Image (spheres, rainbow, N blue to C red):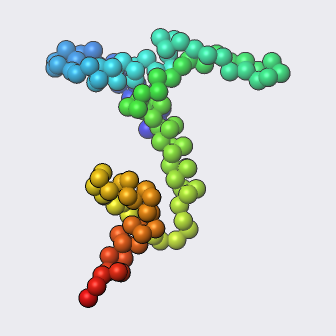
Amino acid sequence: MKPGIVQKIFKDHFEAYRKTRVLGRRRYHAAGNIITCRTSEKGYHIEACPNGDYEVLMHNSCKHRSCPLCGSTETQLWLERRKRQALDCRYFHAVINMSHDLRPLWRYNRKVFTNKRYHPGIGKES
Ligand SMILES: [Zn+2]
């Protein structure tokens, strides 16, 4: 999708859309950020090289998590970081839920708890 297309849709249609329904404060806030992201309404900063050879005025981004202009960059960076961490083979990523009451015990006995969790039969009397 072309960058800025969602922002244009919001700019062109959000006002009419919001008149047809009641929106919560958070949705209204998100739409406002998307509409004004990287425009003069968000202010600006100057990016310059230390030698003074290059200087450019850049409008500030909104940094709202729902903004596709901001979010897509962050999402791509996050994805690249995850890809660098990924093992070069097939594997499973397991998430284990545990009661909050057990967390202090887990923290100080990680090896014992991990072995019990992954190998629950070990240590059982038969
Ligand atoms: Zn933004």
**Looking at the image, which residue sits at the far right?**
51
Q: Is residue 87 visible?
A: yes
Of 39 and 9, which appears nearest the observer? 39
**x and y, in percent, of residue 51 in the image:** 83, 21
Q: Does residue 118 lie above or below 99 as drawn?
A: below
Q: Does residue 51 lie above or below 74 as drawn?
A: above
Which quarter of the figure is the N terminus placed in? top left
Q: Residue at x 38, y 31 (%)?
A: 66
Q: Does residue 11 lie above or below 90 as drawn?
A: above
**x and y, in percent, of residue 99 in the image:** 28, 55
Quadrant in the rendering for residue 116? bottom left
Of 85 and 35, which appears nearest the observer? 85
Quadrant in the rendering for residue 65? top left
**x and y, in percent, of residue 74 in the image:** 50, 38
Residue 71 in the figure: left or right of residue 13: right
**x and y, in percent, of residue 107 in the image:** 43, 56
Q: Is residue 17 visible?
A: no
**Looking at the image, which residue sits at the far left?**
21
Number of callouts: 0
Which quarter of the figure is the C terminus placed in? bottom left
Residue 51 in the figure: left or right of residue 115: right
Residue 46 in the figure: left or right of residue 50: left
**Looking at the image, which residue sits at the far bottom?**
126
Q: Residue at x 36, y 76 (%)?
A: 119
Q: Residue at x 36, y 54 (%)?
A: 103
Q: Residue at x 55, y 57 (%)?
A: 85
Of 3 and 52, which appears nearest the observer? 52
Residue 54 in the figure: left or right of residue 66: right
